């Protein structure tokens, strides 16, 4: 903190004798600057910011009340303590001055000990306030940095958990990175549709992006002989494979319970993991939901997941071209997929293609 001699006080008074008195009382302790009118004071304050202002009320051209009002309306001067130093001793005068933002009101004739103490106290108070503001800014910065770190950690954990499931299926490669970006791209496009604009807030879209990697987390619970089988699954094997949606939801519910909280991204993660295999016409699984009964998050994920499966090589099929994949998605409008989501997909199909190319697997599966 600065010493008193480094503190500056602007005295605004049109009477030289009054200025001399103030200088005599305070100049040994503070740097004193003088303005003999309100207009002059405001010009000084455009370039300089004193630590405290002593302001007379009765001045020509512009009285002290108007000067104080203007000081308190300027961003660079509004926090400077203003003390009225005046011969106007009526209660209503003092009340008016304080209502305009002054911190104190001293009547003339001046008592040197009182002036010294009040100036000292208000400077100390202002210094303490400034210190607290600085500490609050530092605290806000640290909280912001910590929040960012936690968000980054959350992202890493979600991707890592998704990768754990995908690691059991060596053909999926960058599937997680691609589908995560497809989901965000499609969600942003859907904000243009009245059906979805209220729901798809920036916060929800971020939650969808964060939770998308968990869509197949339930694969961890599927036996290797089924998950890695190169040929067609039997009815019983497919029934077991379908349970990955329930395994995924239950795993996220368990994680949610251990944290004793419900966050948007966990809500979306549960919906996506459990319902992304549902179909618009009710022929999907695990519950056979149809239409708007299927969560929006799961409907978005369905488009992203199927598109990526189509353009990716599998043991049971080659990688389809982007054009063919788009054709299949469009054909699924009203049966597999929400028609509005297919419409939005058509609008940004090129974005999907660019994402696929940017995060193509090593073997160059993306056509």
Image (cartoon, helix red, strand yellow):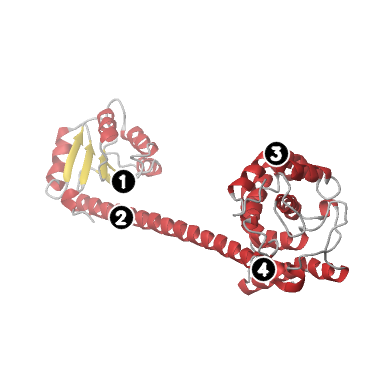
- Residue 6, how many percent across, how many down? 18, 49
Badge 1 crowding class, 10 Å Cα cut-off, few under 14, some 14 to 19, many 20 or more, is many
Residue at disc 2, secondary structure = helix
Label of residue 81 in the image: 1
Question: Is disc 4 in contact with disc 3, using a CB cutoff of under 8 Å?
Answer: no
Q: Of callouts 4 and 3, which one flags the residue occurring earlier in the amino acid sequence?
A: 4
Question: Is disc 1 in contact with disc 2, using a CB cutoff of under 8 Å?
Answer: yes
Residue at disc 4, secondary structure = loop
In three-dimensional space, the C-alpha distance between marks 4 and 1, rounded to whole angstroms, equals 68 Å
Badge 4 crowding class, 10 Å Cα cut-off, few under 14, some 14 to 19, many 20 or more, is some
Q: Name the residue under label 3.
A: 192
Q: Name the residue under label 4.
A: 168
- Residue 321, how many percent across, how many down? 72, 44
Q: Of callouts 1 and 2, which one flags the residue occurring earlier in the amino acid sequence?
A: 1
In three-dimensional space, the C-alpha distance between marks 1 and 3, rounded to whole angstroms, equals 51 Å
Q: Which marked residue is nearer to the observer: mark 1 or mark 3?
A: 3
The residue lying at 36 percent from left, 34 percent from top is 70
Q: Mark 2 points at which residue?
A: 125
Residue 56 horizontal side relative to residue 289, left or right? left
């Amino acid at each position: 903190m600065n010493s008193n001699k480094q503190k500056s006080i602007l005295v605004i008074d049109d009477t030289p004798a009054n200025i001399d008195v103030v200088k005599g009382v305070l100049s040994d302790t503070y740097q004193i600057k003088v303005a003999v009118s309100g207009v002059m004071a405001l010009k000084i304050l455009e370039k300089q910011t004193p630590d405290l202002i002593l302001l007379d009320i009765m001045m020509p051209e512009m009285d002290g009340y108007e000067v104080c009002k203007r000081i308190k309306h300027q961003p660079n001067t509004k926090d400077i303590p203003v003390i009225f130093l005046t011969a106007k001793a009526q209660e209503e005068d003092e009340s008016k001055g304080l209502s305009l933002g002054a911190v104190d009101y001293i009547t003339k004739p001046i008592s040197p000990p009182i002036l010294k103490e009040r100036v000292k106290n208000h400077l100390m108070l202002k210094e303490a306030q400034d210190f607290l503001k600085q500490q609050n800014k530092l605290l806000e910065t640290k909280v912001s940095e910590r929040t960012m770190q936690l968000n980054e950690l959350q992202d890493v954990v979600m991707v890592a958990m998704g990768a754990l499931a995908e690691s059991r299926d060596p053909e999926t490669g960058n599937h997680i990175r691609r589908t995560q970006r497809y989901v965000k791209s499609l969600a942003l496009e859907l904000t243009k549709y009245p059906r979805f604009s209220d729901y798809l807030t920036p916060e929800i879209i971020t939650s969808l992006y964060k939770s998308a990697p968990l869509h197949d987390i339930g694969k961890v619970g599927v036996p290797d002989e089924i998950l890695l089988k190169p040929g067609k699954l039997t009815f019983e094997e497919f029934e077991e494979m379908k349970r990955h949606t329930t395994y995924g939801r239950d795993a996220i519910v368990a994680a949610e319970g251990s944290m004793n909280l419900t966050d948007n991204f966990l809500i979306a993660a549960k919906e996506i993991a459990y319902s992304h295999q549902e179909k618009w016409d009710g022929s999907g699984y695990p519950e056979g939901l149809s239409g708007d009964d299927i969560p929006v998050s799961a409907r978005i994920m369905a488009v992203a997941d199927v598109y990526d499966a189509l353009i990716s090589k599998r043991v049971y099929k080659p990688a389809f071209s982007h054009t063919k994949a788009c054709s299949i998605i469009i054909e699924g409008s009203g049966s597999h997929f929400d028609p509005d989501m297919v419409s939005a997909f058509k609008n940004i199909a090129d974005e999907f293609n660019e994402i696929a190319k940017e995060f193509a697997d090593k073997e160059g599966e993306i056509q």
